[in-house]
Image (spheres, rainbow, N blue to C red):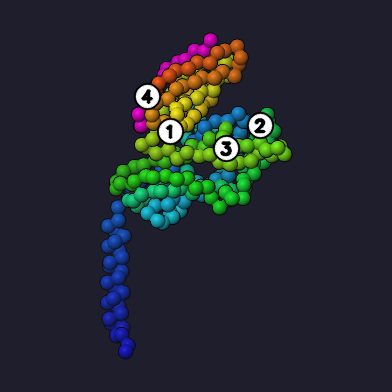
Amino acid sequence: MKTPLKTLGTLSLIFIVFFSSCTKDREYAKLDIRLTDAPGQFNNVFIDIQGIEIHSDSVWIKPSNFNAGIYDLLEFNNGLDTLLCAIDIPVGKISQIRLILGDNNTIVHDSISYPLTIPSGQRSGLKLNLHMDIQPNVSYTILLDFDVAKSIILNGNGQYILKPVIRAITNQTNGKIKGYILPMSAQPTVYAINASDTLSAIPDNNGFFMISGLNGIYDLLINPGNAAFQDTLISGIQVPWGTIIDVDTITLH
């Protein structure tokens, strides 16, 4: 039995109206994904970032406006970051982020450039677990904190291997400690330490440092590279989420 063309047309129109209504009624939020760095002892760390995918409610979302390119991670420490993408994302639950890396990765150490090799198992994308509820009409930020010191390994053959260690920091977990370390001739490294993790920062030329992604109670250890100066420890700094704790200026002796 043939279905009249008029009936088919009516069914098609009903489907289009229903689909358009569902799409129109869907709620969205604003999401920025940004890149920052926990430092390492190199001149430059150039990472080839080609794309990102967001797993939300069992669907992978691939932003079309991603800022692909080669980034020097050491330009983005002590509170600095750069925008990778900004999208309108459907309301729901984000469970994972997949970061797609290219092959053009290098480091510069003692003014000499070396290739960074990515293990074959990570070429399809580096997955970061995340549990983030997205509510309508809210602006969210996910900060990808690339830990350079933990991510680069020198193997026995003299080759540098890139095994990325990245934390995904959200609005809820982004407490911070900031301050100044003087004098810079002490060549200090700053560590925020608690029972589950250790985060670090190398102060800039003015002595300023900022450590992000904190939530809890931390000990702050300042470890000078210059043996003429002593370690300094400040214990029990409470960092609630979304707050910045200023320890002011710490002078090493």
Of marks 1 and 4, the one in the foreground: 4
Kind of residue indicated by mark 1: Gly
Magenta highlight on residue 251:
yes
Instruction: Please tell me which of labels 1 and 2 falls first in the chain.
Output: 2
Above-or-below relation of 89 to 140: below
Q: Is residue 14 visible?
A: yes
Gap in Å between the C-alphas at discs 1 and 4? Answer: 13 Å
**SS of the residue at dot 4?**
strand
For the residue carrying disc 1, how many other residues have a C-alpha within 10 Å: few (<14), some (14-19), or many (20+)? many
Q: Is residue 181 magenta?
A: no
Residue 235: give x, y in percent of width and height. 43, 19
Compare marks 3 and 1 and give the one earlier in the sequence.
3
Q: Residue at x 42, y 17 (%)?
A: 248
The CA span between labels 3 and 2 is 15 Å
| Residue type beneath disc 2 | His
Residue 241 point in image, percent of width and height: 36, 32
- Residues at marks 1 and 2, CA–CA distance in whole angstroms: 27 Å
Question: With 134 as the anchor, is 250 left or right in this view?
Answer: right
Sequence order check, earlier mark of 2 and 4: 2
Give the total of numbered labels: 4
In the picture of the structure, the residue carrying the numbered disc 2 is 109
Kindly report the distance in space between the C-alpha atoms of the residues bearing marks 2 and 4. 36 Å
Magenta segment boundaries in residue numbering: 240-253
Q: Report the residue at 30% width, 78% height from top.
A: 9
Q: Quadrant of residue 26?
A: bottom left
Q: Which mark is residue 213?
A: 1
Instruction: Farthest residue to the right: give it.
Output: 157
Q: How far separated are the C-alphas under marks 3 and 1?
A: 17 Å
In the picture of the structure, the residue carrying the numbered disc 3 is: 151
Dot placed on the residue nearer the N-terminal end, 3 or 2:
2
Residue at 30%, 70% in the rendered image: 15
